[in-house]
Amino acid sequence: MIDRYARPKMKQVWSEENKYDRWLEVELAVCEAWTAEGVIPADDMAKLRGARHDMTRLNEILARTRHDVTAFLSSITEQLGPEGRWIHLGLTSSDVWDTATNLQLIDAADLLDSEVDALLDALKQRAQEHKHTPMMGRTHGVHAEPVTFGLKLALWWDEMRRNRTRLSQAREAIAVGKISGPVGTHATAPPSIEARVCEALGIASAPVSNQIIQRDRHAQFVTTLALVAASLEKIATEIRGLQRTEVREVEEPFREGQTGSSSMPHKRNPELTERVCGLARLVRGHAVTALENVALWGERDISHSSAERIILPDSCMALDYSLDLLAGVVRGMRVYPDRMASNMELTRGLLFSQRVLLSLVERGMSREDAYKVVQANSMRTWDEDSDFRQLVRDDPEVNCRIAAAELDEIFDYGYYVRHVDEIFERVGL
């Protein structure tokens, strides 16, 4: 991931230095397990605990061996004495690689969880702030009936809660280790070694493995990130839409001195939310690759390896960045209630069409006839720039059934949002 979209903590999780630190952590945990079972002498284990890898030396060896695990092992053992022979005892590369990678994924999941919490807090605060701020609800991009901006935010908050649960489930799926040797038979590393190692690392043992930890687990993790990113894109897309000049009900934060265009000084573009949408596409693409990594030849091939070197860190870093970015947008976005109110009046009362329809039905008119009456007045409103409410009041088919005072009650915005408090209680806000 380029530095522009890589935040320090997540970048550190996926750094080469941290990767090899995790490899060494696994190797030493295996040595400790062999020591507990009486294979490695205690004196040798005492020396092994001081083992270190040297990045410079590792890269020098790698240039020759073209195999990062053997280069890693050589960079360690050449600094040790005879006790170095115990490093990697009974293991295959994937024992170390897969177990350590899952430790990195766990750390990444914990960082993402904290960012989800930050976005949830921002959404909750703004939802409560605008709980009763009325605005136009839209379907197909066309005015429908009123909602409140708080309800829109509450909907996003509830979805992000589900994403937090999904992320926790994906973390659990990936929190396993594998110390079962070549092709997973435990012939060179008995199950007791795996159990000791995984307990020491704070993860579960994969109940069964071949030469690798099965990639359905990684696919679940990456597709979960893609789903979270899709929710972020949903929120960002709506904010972008509400920022359009013709709507202008909500606007991204725009700092003093910021510029929106190199050629048009007036522009205040929704570039932050557009960035969230763009990065969501990236993570979705990685989800496809993760799914394709599930099917490998026999007990394993390494067609997944090259892809995972990109998709695992980049998915985590892109989502980490997007979560933080969108939380900042939500906290700092400008909301224009007056504009929301004026937009509700753009169609001159057309939003009350369903209420008039239902009122006519309740007073004995067939639904088909009521629909024709209301639609005729609606089309006149569209075509003649007339006020729907006045047209309805003047329509003999209506005023012979509905009194003027009753029509005043029908043309009340508050009717549409009278259950907002109940919805907020139900969702837990």
Image: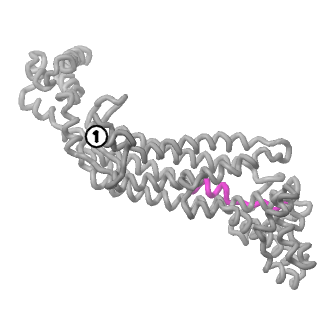
Question: Residue pushed farthest left?
Answer: 404
Question: Residue pushed farthest front?
Answer: 263
**Residue 273: % across, % down:** 43, 45
Q: Is residue 196 placed above or below 419 in the rendered structure?
A: below
Q: Is residue 376 placed above or below 233 in the rendered structure?
A: above
Task: Say whether residue 27 is magenta.
Answer: no
Which of 188 and 79 lies nearest the eye of the viewer? Answer: 79
**Residue 428: % across, % down:** 37, 55
**Residue 261: % across, % down:** 38, 42
Segment colored magenta? 168-180
Which of 349 and 426 lies nearest the eye of the viewer? Answer: 349
Which residue is drawn at the image coordinates 30% and 42% (left, top)? 266
Which residue is drawn at the image coordinates 86% and 59% (left, top)? 92
Q: Quadrant of residue 55?
A: bottom right
Task: Say whether residue 179 is magenta.
Answer: yes
Quadrant of the drawing holding the C terminus: bottom left
Q: Is 208 situated left or right of 171 in this image?
A: right
Q: Mark 1: few, some, or many residues within 10 Å (few <14, many ≥20)? A: some
Which residue is drawn at the image coordinates 16% and 21% (left, top)? 385
Which residue is drawn at the image coordinates 83% and 53% (left, top)? 211
Which three-letter amino acid code belongs to the residue tagged 1? Arg
Label 1: element kind = loop
Residue at label 1? 248
Question: Residue pushed farthest bottom?
Answer: 43
**Residue 419: % across, % down:** 26, 45
Is residue 220 shown to the viewer in this render?
Answer: yes
Is residue 425 shown to the viewer in this render?
Answer: no
